[in-house]
Every structure is written in C-alpha cells, then in structure tokens.
Image (spheres, grey):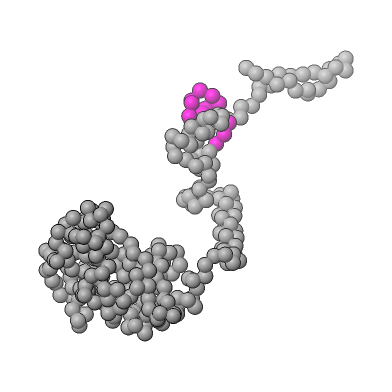
C-alpha cells in the first residue's frame, strides 16, 4: 500500500522520527463508467462517479446527461439541508437578475405590453369580437402573430387550420379579415390551385371539396364536451367571427360529411348535429 512519510517528533539524537501512515483515499467508490479505476469526479446532475475526463464524456453521451446541476430538482423534506436552502436562494437571485435584465433590454419587442393588448381588444370589440388574451408565458400567447393595421382599419389574423380526417394541422399568419374562408382553403384543398405537397396529404379533402364544412370551437360554453360554431365559407373572417369569443386567435376545424359535431345554435344552446 502507498504510504506517506510524515514528521512527528524528534529522537534522542536530535534527528526527527518518522512514522508510516496510510494515504487517505479520495473516494470510496469506483468509476461507474469503466468500473476499474478509483472515482475522482461526481456529476452535479445525476450524481454518477467518474475517474477521468474520457469517462465523464462517455457517461454524458450514454446517459444523455448535460452535467449541469438541476436547480429545480425535487428534494424530500427529510433530506433538505442548508446546502439545498442556499441553492434555492441562489436560484431565486438568478431568476430576479434575468427578469431585471429583460426589462432593461431595449432591443426586445414591446408589443406584449398591457397598452398594446388593450388596444387590440378594444379594436376587436368594435368589430363585435370578444377577444381574450392569455397571460405572458402561455404557448398560445407566444405563438400569436395577430395585429391590427391602423391605416387599413382591419385585423390581420393568426390562423390555425386543423384537418381532423387527415390528422393535419397548418398555421397561416397575417390573414386579412376581409378574406373569405373559401379563399383561404383554396391553398389547401383546391384540386388545381392548392400546393402539391399539401394536396397529397389532404387527398380525402381534395376529392370531396364540395362536402367540406368549417367549424370553430365555442369558448364560452357550459362544462361538458366541446361545442362548435359552424362557419360560412362564402363569408369573410370578420363576418364569421362576429359575436363570438376568441382566445388569442381562431382555430378552424375543416371536416367532411359524416363527422359528428356538437353545434351551438343562434341562441347559444348546444344541439347535436350530424354533417
């Protein structure tokens, strides 16, 4: 066994006496990657032991571990100590710094401020549309690209179009509110004017374009199954969205004959309808 010479005391002739003491091991565990060498490193994220840089890199590849400590990992109360408390405190400090930095950054867009959103909702109200805005952080809020053109006095909507029979979903941006639903759907299901790639995927719709109907989910409804408004493909977006509630942007469901839907009638009473 390796030993370390440590001076302890002087002998009778004035020469120092030495004693042999065993060297303390750095770790009592062996490397969990190669299993043959003594561990020298411990991964901050998954707590696996490694002996060298190659083993550290190999463990990251095999375990898909990034080696960064998870600051939000769950710690049971019976194992919560001072180190965990300090870690949480530093995490809150980091979050505060990031928030403060974003508020000071003049290059970030400011179109999500309360003033702009209130303007957007007021304009929608003048068009008899009840527009609801989600809090910042929701994916639908981040995704929404709807805006109001002051000079042209119209909305340019962010649209999500769903084709349930083909399990397909597409997104349209900056769609003017004076465009009819029929014109919007031409790009998808028209036998001659639609995109060739999209046409291949939506074969069922292209072959039955005359039987297509468009629905939009009714947001203000009683608890229960989803209910929908049936939209008129010959009318434009502004007319179809009138007197309806939207959350961020319209999601249109394009269906074929035979699809069962719960349709909301003019008096907002749900009534079953079979296409």
View extreme (front): residue = 192
> Where residue 273 sits in the image (x, y, percent)?
13, 71
- Above or below, 164 relative to 83: below
Q: Main secondary structure of the magenta part?
A: loop
Residue 124 percent coordinates (x, y):
37, 80
Give x and y (percent) for residue 48. 50, 36
Q: In this image, 54 relative to 203: left or right?
A: right
Residue 120 seen by the camera: no
**Residue range corresponding to the magenta coloring:** 28-42
Front residue of 38 and 117 = 117
Residue 83, percent across and down?
58, 49
* Residue in view at x 44 percent, y 37 percent: 63
Quadrant of the image containing the N terminus? top right
Farthest bottom residue in view: 126
Tell me the quarter of the picture where residue 20 sits: top right
Give the camera-side residue of 123 and 265.
123
Seen in the picture, residue 240 relative to 94 is either above or below; the reply is: below
Kindly identify the residue that appears in the image at 23 percent across and 56 percent down.
199
**What number of labels is visible?**
0
Q: Is residue 94 left or right of residue 111?
A: right
Q: Residue at x 56, y 31 (%)?
A: 53
Q: Residue furthest right?
A: 13
Q: Quadrant of the C terminus?
A: bottom left
Evaluate whether residue 197 shows in this view.
yes
Q: Residue at x 57, y 60 (%)?
A: 98
Q: Splitting the image into 4 quarters, where does residue 21 fall? A: top right
Q: Is residue 33 magenta?
A: yes
The magenta stretch spans residue 252? no
Instruction: State the residue in front, 194 or 50.
Output: 194
Vertical placement of residue 29 versus 90, above or below: above
């Amino acid at each position: 066994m390796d030993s370390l010479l440590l001076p302890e005391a002087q002998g009778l002739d004035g020469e120092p006496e030495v004693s042999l003491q065993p060297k303390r091991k750095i770790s009592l565990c062996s490397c969990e990657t190669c299993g043959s060498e003594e561990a020298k490193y411990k991964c901050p994220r998954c707590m696996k032991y490694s002996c060298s840089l190659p083993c550290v890199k190999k463990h990251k590849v095999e375990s898909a571990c990034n080696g960064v400590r998870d600051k939000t990992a769950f710690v049971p109360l019976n194992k919560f100590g001072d180190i965990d408390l300090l870690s949480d405190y530093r995490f809150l400090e980091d979050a505060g710094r990031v928030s403060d930095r974003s508020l000071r950054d003049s290059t970030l867009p400011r179109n999500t401020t309360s003033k702009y959103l209130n303007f957007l909702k007021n304009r929608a109200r003048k068009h008899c549309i009840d527009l609801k805005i989600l809090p910042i952080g929701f994916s639908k809020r981040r995704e929404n690209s709807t805006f109001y053109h002051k000079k042209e006095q119209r909305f340019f909507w962010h649209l999500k179009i769903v084709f349930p029979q083909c399990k397909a979903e597409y997104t349209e941006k900056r769609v003017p509110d004076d465009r009819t639903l029929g014109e919007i759907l031409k790009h998808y299901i028209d036998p001659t004017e639609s995109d060739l790639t999209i046409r291949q995927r939506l074969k069922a719709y292209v072959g039955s374009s005359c039987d297509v109907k468009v629905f939009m989910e009714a947001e203000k409804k009683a608890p229960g199954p989803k209910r929908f408004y049936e939209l008129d493909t010959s009318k434009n977006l502004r007319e179809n969205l009138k007197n309806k509630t939207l959350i961020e942007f319209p999601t249109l469901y394009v269906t074929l004959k035979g699809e069962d839907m719960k349709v909301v009638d003019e008096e907002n009473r749900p009534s079953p309808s079979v296409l």
